[in-house]
Image (tube, grey):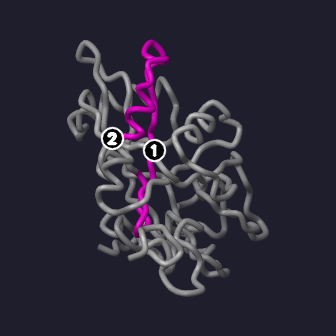
Amino acid sequence: MSPAGSPGGAGRIAAGAPHVLENPVLASLAGPHAHFAERRGRVLRYRLGVAPWLALPDEPDEQDWADLAALAGPGAGIPLAGFTGELPDGWEVTHRIEGVQLVAGHLATAPDAEAVRLGPADVPEMLDLVARTRPGPFLPRTVELGTYLGIRRGGALVAMAGERLHPPGWTEISAVCTDPAARGEGLATRLILAVAHGIQERGETPFLHAGAQNTHALRLYESLGFRLRRRTAFLAARAPEWLAEGGVAVSVA
């Protein structure tokens, strides 16, 4: 049987179809994360408080862009992870970071005896750690997206990592962060490998995203066995005001 993520495995949805990692937000919201999704037409987004991402279809048309604007609301900055196409006339890019998408090769994964499972009761500490280390978007309900592991010292949360996007056959490792006072101890490495271990135990393949300029993180990920799959971008856009005309989001769950 082909392993998850191989050309013949769960990482592809049909012969000739785009790989699910080409549009991982859409693949997640249309698949394993459908219970977190809100929809307008063919456009999906995570529920507020869970994650900031919205997803267009692979080849958006004029109606899709109108639905995206209405779903986001007037004046909103619209995060579009991994979108590499051209924006329609009147749309404005408000933020852009060049990024990379990495997939697991041969990882020496293992559980970590010191790591503890984090849940809703830990969210205040998780948000505080994220605010001090800035690993990327993490909202009050992001912890619901998958397994989050943390390491505590003296009762205080000093490092964590967890699961975010979940395209079929794949799980993204995200929110990897360590308190500055605890850096240099290899805690991030241990947590990445522990989270990856759980992903692989489910028969799925770990992947992750990083800023292309974050050379320290990239060196770490490559040393663990991740390899570059593609270059991407993290951008936010603002719709023309005349497009964002109300509309009610409809749950797909």
Q: Quadrant of the N terminus?
A: bottom left
Query: In the displayed structure, does residue 15 sit left or right of residue 175?
Result: right
Q: Nearer the viewer, residue 161 or 142?
A: 161
Which span is picked out in magenta?
Answer: 164-193
Q: Pick out the residue farthest to the bottom.
A: 15
Query: In the rendered view, does 149 fall on the left or right side of 88?
Result: left
User: What residue sits right under mark 1 in the picture?
Assistant: 174
Seen at 28% across and 22% down, the residue is: 152
Image quarter of the C terminus = bottom left
Decide which of tag 1 and tag 2 comes sooner along the chain: 2
| Residue 57 spot, x, y in % from top left | 57, 76
Residue 110 disc label? 2
Residue 60 as seen in the image, left or right of residue 143: right
Image coordinates of residue 61 in percent, x first then y, are 66, 81
Report the front residue among 214 and 239: 214
Circle on res. 38? none
Expressed as whole percent of the image width and height from the top left, the position of residue 75 reads: 60, 55
